[in-house]
Amino acid sequence: MPIFDYQTEDAIGSVYSVDTGTVLLSVSNLDALRRMQVNHLVVLRSSRAGQHLIGLINKIMRKALVGVNEDEQDDNDIQDDSIAVENIVRLTLIGTLLDAVGTEQNVFRRTLETVPEIDAPCFMLGGERLTGFMRAISKQIVEGQEPLSLGKYTLDEEADAWIDGNRFFQRHAVVVGSTGSGKSWTVARILEQVAQLPNASALLFDIHGEYSPLDGDGISHLKVAGPGDLTANKTLADGVLYLPYWLLTYEEMLAMLLDRSDQNAPNQAMVFNREVTDAKRAYLESSKKDEVLANFTIDSPVPFEIQAVLERLIFLNEERVEGARKGTTKAGDFNGKLSRFIQRLDAKRQDRRLGFMFSAGDDAMRYEWMQELATVFLGSTKVRGAGGVKIIDFSEVPSDILPLIIGLVARVVFSVQQWTDKDKQHPVALLCDEAHLYIPERHESGVSEQGLKSFERIAKEGRKYGVGLAVISQRPAEVNRTVLSQCNNFVAMRLTNAEDQSVIRRLMPDTLGGFAELLPILDIGEALVVGDAAMLPSRIRIDEPTKHPSSATVDFWDRWAAENVEDGIADAVEALRKQQSSAE
């Protein structure tokens, strides 16, 4: 049964002018004009039977026209001016609803097969018709499945707001909003619904541990090992994550260890390459992995002993060879040239904060370790027997190597997906909270650059291999433009910074540029949703998630006004020294 059963007498106005995708309406009914709101949807009768055009109100104008009343004009009298008021509404056409296509009813298409005729009637879209319209869109895209629910439409709170979960993750997404706008709330709302799916697979990169309150069926928590976890000998079975150094590529290892300003940097890089390759070869030979041995490279994720590499570097740095005269010696080719590199490598090995890389233990040196790690990252709810949504806490990872470590996780996920048979690939989504910290627009170090490369590749090629990306940030102006440009879905909450608003405005379609003007005036928990998943640009009030992230802002004034406040400074200083929180 057709959704739009408007009668001509229901019209609020008629078409005054048509220009490609822009339409001007003439509205004579003042009551109808008052009911109209900018960014509300309206329906236009098409020139073809069984079709209606959907428009978005851009501007509502009222013009006063001053003219001469010719009936009362007298040559001997001063001419009287008469005033006429003209009500004009400007629309952007965004699609067509067809009553039927074959056996399917109420099919929406984001194309304009026709344009409205002059004087064609226009109708308001709201209430049950809006709800029915949105349900029809969701049904045709996700037939037989429950679409992803965000909340209610701001302009019509009787209508549920749904988006297509397939397209949301397939075409990559951006969730942005200033501090306190409800961004984490929105992410929690989405994650709760993902977790309810029986075969979900998603990873959330939690930088500050604010998503720790989210729990329940379908959600599991992982934490990159901190110094306290090393002392307690916690393992992957305890939800503690180790990322051994041998997972790093050659360029990633150099970014962390090599000072390129050192005049001996080329020699250091060359020797390190050779020694790591030899160490990996020795491991494969001892493990009798002949097929891998014939094809491995420096970047192959093969375990090797970093201690053996360090000892070899020390030997070369101190080596003396036979001199030209018998019985004399001279400095070897690399004597004294590797000192600074050795110091940096040894310092990293001894740093307890990097224990998750260099002190992972014998368990992480097994050949099978990467398969177990990849199963944790990529396994769905049924495969792992645990939550399909994995929230990874990176709060104890040092900030100077954070981009490299998160990029490593993303690269491992993408690489395993890439090498999985097409018919066995199970899609996985990466949700990148605080993305501006590790997907930066401007990178100042090799560590940032190496981490960024992984996300740029996922943004460009991820869809081919079933890897979706959701970029979450309070500063979109500081997020890499290449990554943002590949995202076709936007959930934009309140943005007060002009640069951030400008970035989102440029990413939106040209016809919806005015839609972005709402960004600074959105309420907390309210969002503009635009993109392939939403089909229609919408202003939505996000529903409250069951569990709230612990991202609430500290109430300065109230705490200062409190009579009794506990002093935790002594505990904090001791925790800083031990690199272990007091809770542990």
Image (cartoon, rainbow, N blue to C red):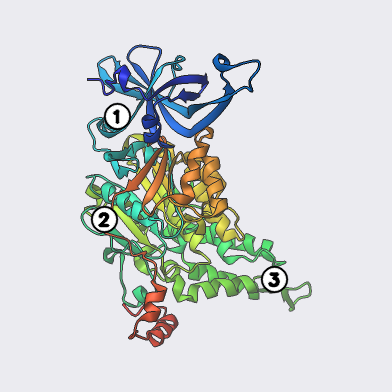
Please say whether residue 438 is visible from this viewpoint. Answer: no
Residues 412 and 143: in front is: 143
Circle 2: residue type:
Ile
Say the numbered circle drawn on residue 332.
3
Q: Earlier in the sequence, mark 3 or mark 1?
A: 1
Q: Is residue 559 above or below residue 274?
A: below
Nearer-the-camera pick, 553 or 165: 553
Residue under label 2: 219
- Can residue 488 be spotted in the picture? yes
**How busy is the neighbourhood of tag 3: few (under 14 within 10 Å), some, or many (20 plus)?**
some
As drawn, 470 above or below 352: above
Considering the image in quadrants, where does the N terminus appear?
A: top left
Q: Quarter holding the C terminus?
A: bottom left
Q: Amino acid at mark 3?
A: Gly
Amino acid marked by disc 1 = Phe
Q: Which residue is mark 1?
A: 133
